[in-house]
Amino acid sequence: PLGGLVRRGWRALRGMVALGTIAVALAQYSPLSAMATEAVFAPTTSAAAIKDFDCERFVGLWYKIAKVQDPKEAPRTRDRMEFMLRYDGTISLINTYYSPQRNVWERRHEALEPVHRKGTNSSHKESTASFRIQRFGPFHTGFHIMAIDPQYQWAMVADSTPNSFFILARSANVSAATRVQLEKQAASLGIAANKLTWLETDNGATPSTTSSETPFSSP
């Protein structure tokens, strides 16, 4: 009787081990696992940002002319960004855009801090175009300039996902030839032309009022 009990226990144990092996195999080859191991958008870190970046040439007014639409983000148009150098070496950003859903203008005040600098003063000419934007508490988003026109007339920016990719230009409207050039440049960074949404711009018009403002937050 004792021997039979031991044999039955051993068979039960082997069955449990077999079920565990099958479960692990299914987890490894499940769709969720495949999603987790897919190749991610290449420019995810400061190492992918351009070098020999000149902050003094970059500051000023830019228009967001194209982006990869994030399904989680509320639609917005006439998006413009104004960058200004601050005394401590950070860059002040005023982001103004129109919210069609709310039928109002929105404005955000934020700051860009070079990610390689740990609170020390440095020249306004940063060698790497990689910044972070402080959000709430310890949270922040990346602002990595992946490509830029030699004359600083357009720039391509991303954080860590394809949905964070967008294109800035000094002019609210660009020619068809320039658009083709930008699509080719974006493709070299892993963004297909059919993923880009070309945005409605404000043609230089200045919004008279805004419905809400997010206070400037220093990093």
Image: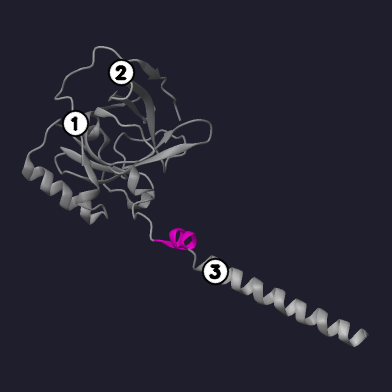
Please state the extent of the stretch shown in magenta in the rendering. Answer: 31-38
**Can you give x and y, in whole percent of width and height, for residue 141 in the image?**
42, 39
**Can you give x and y, in whole percent of width and height, for residue 135 in the image?**
46, 31
- Residue found 22% across the figure and 56% down from its top: 188
What's the colour scheme? one colour
Judged from the image, the secondary structure of the residue bearing numbered disc 2 is strand
Q: Amino acid at mark 2?
A: Val
Tell me the crowding category of disc 1: few under 14, some 14 to 19, or many 20 or more residues within 10 angstroms, Cα based: some
Q: CA distance from mark 1 to mark 3?
A: 46 Å
Camera-side residue of 87 and 107: 107
- Magenta region includes residue 88: no
Q: Quadrant of the N terminus?
A: bottom right
Q: Disc 3 designates what residue?
A: 26
- Residue found 71% across the figure and 73% down from its top: 16
In the displayed orientation, state which residue is furthest to the right. 1
Camera-side residue of 22 and 56: 22
Name the main secondary structure of what is drawn in magenta.
Answer: helix
Q: Is residue 196 toward the left or the right of residue 21 in the image? A: left
Q: Amino acid at mark 3?
A: Leu
Q: Which mark is residue 200?
A: 1
Image quarter for residue 132?
A: top left
Mark 2 vs mark 1: which is more N-terminal? Answer: 2
Q: CA distance from mark 2 to mark 1?
A: 15 Å
